[in-house]
Image (cartoon, rainbow, N blue to C red):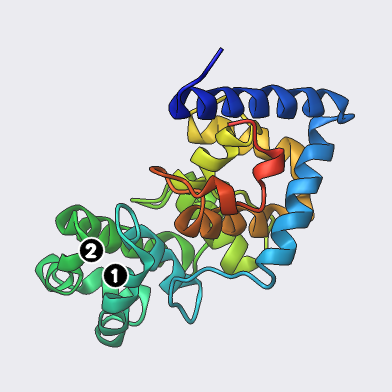
Amino acid sequence: MLFSGNSLKSRQRNLKKISVCLNFRNLTTMKTRANKICEILKKIYPNVKTQLRHRNSFELLIATILSAQCTDKQVNAVVRELFRIFPTPGEMAEAHQESIESIIHSTGFFRNKARHIRNCSHVLVEKYNGEVPETMGELLTLPGVGRKTANVVLGAAFGVPAMVVDTHVARISKRLGLTRNTNPAKIETDLMGIIPKKDWNDFSLWLIFLGRSVCKARKPACASCPLSDLCPD
């Protein structure tokens, strides 16, 4: 029986999926698979760190709030001016919202972000003596801060093992079969259960870098992906 080019490619993809799934069954545990993925990514992306420009935990906190629905490059383009004028939580809390809006306008959703930044800074001053707290529970009390932002701060500012789940991490971890969930909090829990704790901070960054250049949402470059042999997608 002859197959068209498209049919043949489809069969080849299906055979690859079957082969990969069978190989997965031969791996002793999900942790073994996760370790293999970590070993590969560690060699490709050594010494990874967040691309958000910051000099301290306060600047990282604000930059991460600004990064919602925005690229790191665009955030970095505005934070230098923002922190030049309002370098401390106290000064940011006292700023007029319109002044913040005018600086961060290009990051999108600027009114909501400016409000969160002012309110967050106010809480830092009133409740935490102008210091960024170092626990998940305390960080989540800050306006505009969810688990993603809190994990970025914990990992990058304080060196606390934390699993950041952004769109890249969610997409790629699901493609790799490391989770079946779509809820970020559940994905975070799944990944923390199988990724070595010492790699949590780096793992998120590895997937973010991989997602930006190779494993894109549309038209992923599977042929050049270093994880293609471990990917059932």
Few, some or many residues within 10 Å of mark 1 (<14, 14–19, 20+)? some
In the rendered image, residue 18, in percent from the top left (x then y), is placed at 69, 22
In the rendered image, residue 8, in percent from the top left (x then y), is placed at 53, 25
Few, some or many residues within 10 Å of mark 2 (<14, 14–19, 20+)? many
Residue flagged by tag 1: what amino acid is it?
Gln
Residue 124 or residue 51, whichever sits in front: 51
Which residue in the protein does label 1 denote?
74
Locate residue 7 relative to residue 113 in the image: left or right.
right
In the rendered image, residue 204, in percent from the top left (x then y), is placed at 59, 53
Asked whether residue 130 is in view, the answer is no
218 lies above or below 212:
above
Q: Quadrant of the C terminus?
A: top right
Residue 105 or residue 113, whichever sits in front: 105
Residue 193 or residue 138, whichever sits in front: 193
Q: Are marks 1 and 2 in contact (CB under 8 Å)?
A: yes
Locate residue 110 relative to residue 68 in the image: left or right.
left
* Disc 1, SS: helix
The CA distance from mark 1 to mark 2 is 6 Å
Give the residue displayed 48% in from the left and 59% down from the top: 213
Q: Quadrant of residue 70?
A: bottom left
Which residue in the protein does label 2 denote?
107
- Disc on the earlier residue, 1 or 2: 1
Q: Quadrant of the N terminus?
A: top right
Residue flagged by tag 2: what amino acid is it?
Thr
In the rendered image, residue 193, in percent from the top left (x then y), is placed at 74, 36
Give the residue displayed 42% in from the left and 74% down from the top: 59
* Disc 2, SS: helix
From this viewpoint, which residue is outermost toward the bottom? 84
